[in-house]
Amino acid sequence: MPSDADKPDHDSAINLADKLSLFTDHWSPKVIAELNDYQIKLVKLAGEFVWHKHDHTDEMFLCLEGQMKIEFRAGTVELSPGDLYVVPKGIEHKPAAARECHVMIIEPTGVVNTGERVGTLTAPNDKWV
Ligand code: NI
């Protein structure tokens, strides 16, 4: 569990640009807030992720900056800034971004970024920024 020091205080807003300025690594989501049993995360994407699925939860992507796509076995969804997409649970998907893209993800606490496909791109959970 994160320490209380990692969590935002209750007297100030959470600024997305400020939070995005605090990390540079790719494919490693950072938690910025919690909402009941859900976490709101920021992540920077670049290049190709791995095919994976989440058997127990949907996964929400909101593109903040740059362009990204989410590949499915049956097609591809393209996201530009302001575009939101919810990947249904159990559906194989592979995010990708030709150039760096900044994204907000909302999903239940404890979801593994690579789903069932644990590997070099599997990121630790509960990394707050
Ligand atoms: Ni996913």
Image (tube, rainbow, N blue to C red):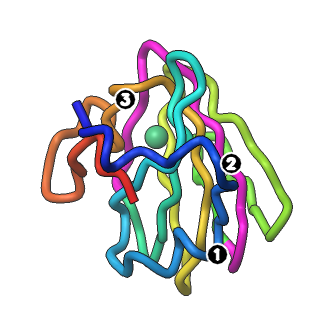
Neighbourhood count class around disc 1 (C-alpha, 10 Å): few under 14, some 14–19, many 20 upward: few
The extreme bottom residue here reads 99
Helix, strand or loop under label 2: strand
Q: Nearer the viewer, residue 32 or 90?
A: 32
Q: Secondary structure at mark 1?
A: helix
Name the outermost residue toward the top.
56
Q: Residue at x 37, y 29 (%)?
A: 111
Q: Give the vertical position of 88 relative to 72 (above or below).
A: above
Q: Amino acid at mark 1?
A: Ala
- Quarter of the image with the N terminus is top left
Task: Please state the horizontal and vertical placement of residue 122, each as a whole percent of the image.
Answer: 22, 49
Q: Residue at x 75, y 43 (%)?
A: 85
Crowd tier of the residue under label 2, counting other residues whose Cα lies within 10 Å: few below 14, some 14–19, many 20 or above: few
* Residue 117 location, quadrant: top left
* Rendered position, 78 above or below 66: above
Residue at the disc numbered 1: 17
Q: Which residues are magenta?
A: 50-67
Give the SS element for disc 3.
loop
Q: Which of these two is toward me, 100 or 76?
A: 100
Going from N to C along the chain, the mark reached first, 3 or 2, is 2
Disc 2 target residue:
75
Question: Residue 6 location in percent, x, y?
Answer: 33, 49
Left or right: where 79 falls relative to 5: right
Residue farthest along the right direction in this orientation: 82
